[in-house]
Amino acid sequence: MPILSTRGGGSAKGFGLTVFSGKSLAGARGVTAGGALGGTGFNEINYFTIATTGNATDFGDLTNSRQASSGVGSLTRGVFGAGSLGNTPSTTNVMDYITIASTGNATDFGDFLSATYGNGGSACSETRGVFAGGYVGPPSNVIQFITIASTGNATDFGDLTVATYFNSTSVSSPTRGIFAGGWNQINIIQFITIASAGNATDFGDLLSGTTRLTGTSNATRGVIGGGIAGSATNVIQFITIASTGDATDFGDLIGTNYTNFSATSNSSRGVFTGGRTSGGGGINVLQYVTIASTGNATDFGDLTYTCYNVASTSNGTGGLN
């Protein structure tokens, strides 16, 4: 459950509860948006309460049907950036935003530096969202950022150590963003300091070169699951965000075919959403892990639609607690 940092021990409000720095907000909400299945693209947005289990509920719609997007969130707002329109190679630079505690359709936020297809990584703090990589013809090494509470176009941040796309993944603490894996099944983990701008720095390595994977975090630990490492894998691995070093085995996802999916979290639980089977079908499964421990994932519930290439965020991610 997310920890609201008020930087001075003061109170903050959310979901009708008053909380204090170091306390928890039980109502932290995960949001999953967009995706594709076969020849169909989706504009659906679903939400669920991370601390409980159960099926997701309809939230509203994106401004267009979109897959391979990336999501960031603050305590109040979620932003979904770029991707492919519908289920076609046609790319978009559009960003949408929602107010996470409410329901309703997304609103235009601004534009990426260029139209991007293929999930890059995304990380966030309370104030800033950072998007890295993606496919803009060749794979991209560009890192760009937004101020989540405002609207407007993205600004250049720096460059990744290697260009990457196709579900490279990312996790974050309030200060650091981590980007891992990606096309051509690379094992590289790299990091940035979210509040500054500049190029990424080497962090360590994944257990193996992996693409189409996903990850999420609390403020100290990142968990990264699934993907393709030669073949589809159900392996979950973890890193300590404040340090550097190689990933360590955490446990396994429920299935062996989880690729092209997403994840989000509060300060104790990470939830993996949707995905794609080795035969190309979609998955509507939600599953979760307890981030501070190790072990296999547990069934959480289902999305309202079956999809892959989805994007997720929450108002309790590791960048906020």
Image (cartoon, helix red, strand yellow):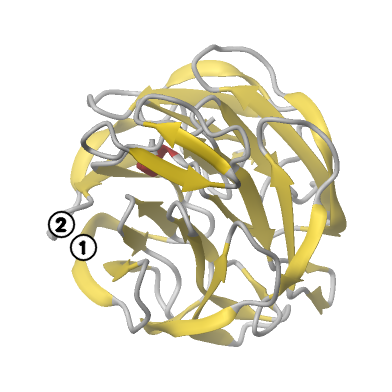
Three-letter amino acid code of the residue under disc 2: Asn
Question: Which is more toward the observer, 157 or 19?
Answer: 19
Three-letter amino acid code of the residue under disc 1: Asp
The circle drawn on residue 241 is: none
Q: Is residue 170 above or below residue 105?
A: above
Q: Residue 264 is drawn in which quadrant?
A: top right
Residue at image mark 2: 199
Question: Which is more toward the observer, 66 or 142?
Answer: 66
Q: Give the number of callouts.
A: 2
Residue at image position (59%, 28%) is 269
**Which percent across, then down, holds residue 245?**
27, 23
In the image, is 60 to the left or to the right of 135? Answer: right
Secondary structure under the numbered disc 2 in the rendered image? loop
Asked if one can make out residue 310 in the rendered structure from this viewpoint, the answer is no
- Around disc 2, counting alpha carbons within 10 Å, would you say few (fewer than 14), some (14 to 19), or many (20 or more)? some
Asked if one can make out residue 66 in the rendered structure from this viewpoint, the answer is yes
Residue at image position (23%, 51%) is 194
**Which percent across, then down, holds residue 113?**
33, 82
Q: Do the residues labelled 1 and 2 touch (CB within 8 Å)?
A: yes
Q: Residue 6 is drawn in which quadrant?
A: top left
**Which percent across, then down, holds residue 266?**
53, 35
Residue at image position (43%, 55%) is 74
Residue at image mark 1: 159
Q: Residue 290 is drawn in which quadrant?
A: top right
Quarter the N terminus occupies: top right
Q: In this view, does 77 lie above or below 244?
A: below
Quarter the C terminus occupies: top left
Secondary structure under the numbered disc 1 in the rendered image? strand
